[in-house]
Structures are given as structure tokens and as C-alpha cells.
Image (cartoon, rainbow, N blue to C red):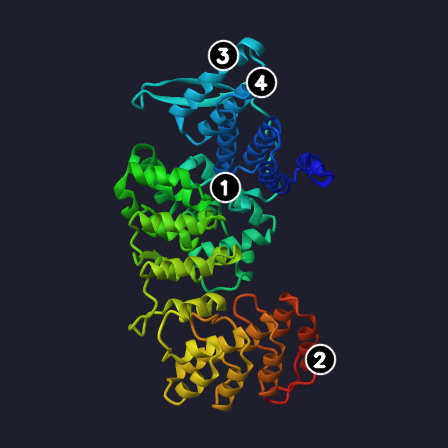
Amino acid sequence: MLDAEIQTMPLQASFLKSAGRFAEAFEIRLNLDAIYGRRGASLPVRTGNLHMLASLALSLENLVDAEWAARKCLALCTPQPADVSDESLATYRIMLAGILAERQVFDEAVSVAESALGHFRGAHGRDSRFVLDYQRDLDDMQKRIVRRYLERAERPSPPSGAGMTSSNPPSQLATLDDYTRQSAALFEAWRSGSAAATWRFKWGHPVFRGRPAAEVRTADLQLADAQLVIAREQEFESWDRLAGFVETLARDANVRRFEAAADAIVTGDLETLCSRLREESELIRARSTRRHGATLLHYIAANGVEQVRQKTPPNAVKVADMLLAAGAEVDALAEAYGTRCTTMSLLVSSAHPAGAGLQTALAERLADAGATLVTSDPQSRSPILTALAFGYLDTARALARRTPPTDDLAIAAGLGLIDEVTRLLATADPLRRQIALALAAQHGHADVVQRLLDAGEDPDRFNPEGFHAHSTPLHQAALAGHREIVQLLVERGARLDMRDTINEGTPHGWAVHGGHREIAESLRAREGAQVWPGGAAAP
């Protein structure tokens, strides 16, 4: 028996759906699927929940998860159990057929629909839940065109701002019309003052690179600017390149195979990925046709690739193991962020695997497979230094345990190795010393910060390029809640009115944003007492 709390979850999901809160309802249904599986719920209960899960995914325009739920639902019904009716089974098939039609997987959509339409037409005539009509298109190699029509299951309008999220389907699922609608939604959201839209333009439009977000809000943008952002989020230089990709996808099976495998990686679909790799041995060495030219292994990093695929499934380590066992080149390079990146360098700077609690484990897997951890090129940043720059101290320490003692002051400072800092400080160049202060403040190593300040480092300089250069060490310490370091920097004369160059926030504002009330109050109290050069009091 399921306990009372679990029994109320379907009601909660239904209420949220009726209120238009589809994402929350989807999460509840997803949790129910796992609970039902563990507790041995009856098949009608499990399949009914999966059917609702697929419907909610459609409402969110998330075709990847919609197809997953619909296929799992049908898999539970094969062979057909006695307690699942013919009509329910036909309904589940029509759901999958409709999803496949939207994904443009026409042949399978027709096959699945044909297995169910007979029952619906016989039982309900034209009142079918879904009806698929297909015909020959003589102008396009007689390709079957599938479209849903008649009494299509009513899909509620996407929630406000749905076009602003990564729930939009990946490129291999979308038509140019889909991208046109996404562009229009983004443009309208920006016109209505959406903060999310503003930041998408800030990071996605080349005009605003290195500029404050405030300039986006006052810019004279057009629909073409939104189209450019959408194209760049899909990793194409222009709207025309994105349109060309959509055309290529329709005629090139190799491109379709790569895109399907990439989808399997980011959704954790081991069965599909294994099948794809078996069918095409060269797939593991293939490259994306997008501007990054990534291999399949790069998608493990959930970084530097198209935004819709920047996510980490719970079984990401098993996915990585499968790719490495299939012969993935661990140090293959892709073009990302204006440079050439390995999977490791993208992984250790990625929020998604870190948020999933899998970044360190994935980094160790890549290291075990021979990924480069130490570089002799002074212009290249090692994975350890990259992890430190992006705030991932645990991953940096895990990789540092696999390498000889560092001769890099910046790495020693970021790891909090005070003895190594003392040893390396005298011979380090000015840039390494500045990076060292930035990393020590960011990671909370007060003894290292004090040693660097004693050696003459300036607490008021903006951090070096590549190490949160829009901020100062005090900004970083305030954001992270390192009270001792904040106090130390202020006592050594760090200015409190310095504003970062992106958000235009003071260290006080960063402490507020980080949720560190005591630090924020302390900084606010000090602002009124601090006097700047020239005798002016702090504003």
C-alpha cells in the first residue's frame, strides 16, 4: 500500500496542471514514476501516471521527456497486461505517435498510429483523441508527411515565460517555424521588460559582450536580434546557418544519428546510446556540425555546447563510462568560448555536473582515462586552475591529488596551501600574485590572503582576466560569505564603493545577493565611515 502522502501527489499534480503550473506538476509526476516503480504499484496506475507525464512534457514543449515517458508507458504494456484495456493501450500508442510526428520521425509515427487508429475509428469515429493523417508528398521523394488534426488532445498554453527556458526542443526535433516562434517569444519578453530575456541578450548577442546588462534594456533591438540570440544558443553563428542546419538534418542521416546520440547522452538514455554506438562504430569519433565541432564525449561536460543540452542526468558517470569504453578520445578539442577546449576543461567549469553532485566523479573518470591534467604551455590553463577559477574547490583538490606538487603560486593559493604559497611567492610574477589573491579570497583562505597582502598585493585592483575580472577580491569574498577575509580586506584599505562592471554592484550588494546579512550590514555600516582619496565620504 502507498502511504497517504503519496496518494495525495496525483491530486497535487492535477491541481498544479489546472493552475497552469506545468513544470511543478511535471516534477511531481516524475517523482511518482520512481516511487511507483520502487513500491510495485499496479500497471494501470504506473501507465496512467506516465501518460500524464508525457502530456505535461508536451505542455512544456519538452519533446525529449515526452517521448521518454510515452515509450516507457508502452514498454510496460508489452506484452499487453490483463489489467490494461485495449482502449488505454491505443491511447498510449496515439500519444507516442503524436510525439513522433512532432519530432518528424515520420515512418515510426505512421507505424505506431496505424496500430491504434483502427480501434479509435471503430469505437469513436471522428471523436478520436488523436487522429494522424498521412499522405504522399510527390515533391519530396514521396516522403510521408504526418500531421495531427481533428480532436487533438488539448494542450494548455505554455506557462508565462516558457519560451525563456531551455525546455524548448533541441534542434533535431524542431523546425524553422519552431525557432521563429522562439525568437518572437524572446523578443516580446524583452519588450515587456523580462529580466530573463535581458540576460539572454546580454550573453547571447555579440554586441553586448563585455557590456553591462543595463545597455540591453535601453538598446534598439529588433526581431532579427532575437533570431541571432536563438541561433547562437543553438551554436550557430547566424540565423541563416541555423536554417541551413535544419535543412541538412532532413537529408543527412549521419547528422541525425549524431544528434540522436547527443540527446541520449544528456538524458541518460543508456539503451539508446548503446544501440547507436553499436550500429555505427565511427559515431564515437564523429563531430557535431555546429560551430563548436564537439565530439559526443564533450556533451558529458554540459558546457560549451548548445544550451538546451547543457544538463547532467543522474547516471552521467555511467554514460561517460560507456563513451570511454567505446573509444572516445579523452583529450579531443572543441571550439568553445573563443578557444579550444577538452572535455575536462569544459567539465571543471560547468555548473550542471557540479549541481548534480557528479562533477568530481566525472573528472576522476576522465583522469583515469588519461585526460591531461598538467600543461607546460603558460598560455593554457590547467584543469585544476580552471576548477578553482570557477569555484569548484572539491574537484580541484581531487585532481591535484593526482598530480605532482604544484609550482604555480595561483594554484597553491586557490587550494589554500600556505606553505607552498610561502615557498613560491618570492619568484612569482605580478600576474600570478594577482591571480593568487583573487583565488584565495574567492575560496576563503584567510591565511593566504594575509600573506599576499603582507607581500604588497593591492586589494583594490579588479581581478585578472579569466578570474572574474568584472569584480574585486572583496566582491568575491562578500558573495561567498567569507567574513574573516572581508574584514581583512577592508582593514587593509579595500574600497567599499567599487562597482563591478557587469551588474554595477558594490561589495555590499554582492553580500546581499549572496544572502550574507551580517556581512552586508557590516559593509553598510563601514561605508558611511570610510573616506576616499580627496576627502570625500563614501556615498
Picture coordinates of residue 533, whole percent (x, y): 59, 88
The residue positioned 53% from the left and 46% from the top of the image is: 186
Query: Observer-nearest residue: 292 or 426?
Result: 426
* Residue 244 visible, this orientation: no
Mark 1 vs mark 3, CA separation in Å: 33 Å
Horizontal arrangement in the rendering, residue 84 relative to residue 209 (left or right): right
Q: Earlier in the sequence, mark 3 or mark 4?
A: 4
Give, as a three-letter code, the residue at label 1: Asn
The spot of residue 90 in percent (x, y) is 53, 19
Q: Are marks 2 and 3 in contact (CB under 8 Å)?
A: no
* Position of residue 135 measured from the top left corner of the image (x, y, whole percent): 39, 17
Q: Mark 3, residues whose alpha carbon is within 10 Å: few (<14), some, or many (≥20)?
A: few
Mark 4 or mark 1, whichever is nearer to me = 4
For image coordinates 29% across by 43% down, the residue present is 283
Residues under numbered marks 1 and 3 in contact, where contact means CB atoms less than 8 Å apart? no
Q: Which residue is mark 2?
A: 525
Residue highlighted by disc 3: 118
